Amino acid sequence: MTEVQQGERDPEVEARIAQVAFTADGLAPVIVQQWDTREVLMLAWVDAEALRRTLTSGRATYWSRSRQEYWRKGDTSGHIQVVREARLDCDGDAILLLVDQTGPACHTGTRTCFDTTDLGAVDGSASS
């Protein structure tokens, strides 16, 4: 890969971002998993710029729909996400981000954003 000068966009990164089928709002959902255990940590959103920052910096950056701004995970809390891998799903409309999570992933202080309400789904394996 050739070295890209500061301020220039890497054509290889741009080609990967172009594969994403963003919503009409310009966003794509990101499923975030702990890279070694595959524990699902959170769901977030990115636009093309947040994805570009994530792919080129090694730190997870998202778009906050409520605050309408970029946020790099951990900049204020210290609970950083170091990127290990990023994958696009078969339809190109969802991203899987494998990270090394430091501290809780959820803003509520829990390890994952899925540690709260159990919706009580029937265990389908019991009804064969």
Image (spheres, rainbow, N blue to C red):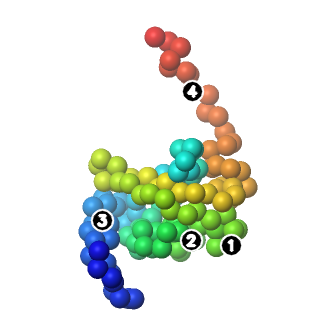
Q: Is residue 27 above or below residue 70?
A: above
Q: CA distance from mark 3 to mark 2?
A: 20 Å
Percent from the top left, x then y, of residue 112?
64, 49
- The residue that disc 1 covers is 76
Along the polypeptide, which appears first: circle 3 or circle 4? 3
From the image, state whether disc 2 or disc 4 is nearer to you. Answer: 2
Residue 76 sits in quarter:
bottom right
The disc label shown at residue 121, or none? 4
Percent from the top left, x then y, of residue 84?
49, 59
- The residue that disc 2 covers is 72
> Is residue 86 visible to us here?
yes
Along the polypeptide, which appears first: circle 3 or circle 1? 3
Q: CA distance from mark 2 to mark 4?
A: 34 Å
What amino acid is found at the position of numbered circle 4 in the picture?
A: Ala
What amino acid is found at the position of numbered circle 1 in the picture?
A: Thr
Q: CA distance from mark 3 to mark 4?
A: 37 Å
Question: Which element carries disc 4, helix, strand or loop?
Answer: loop
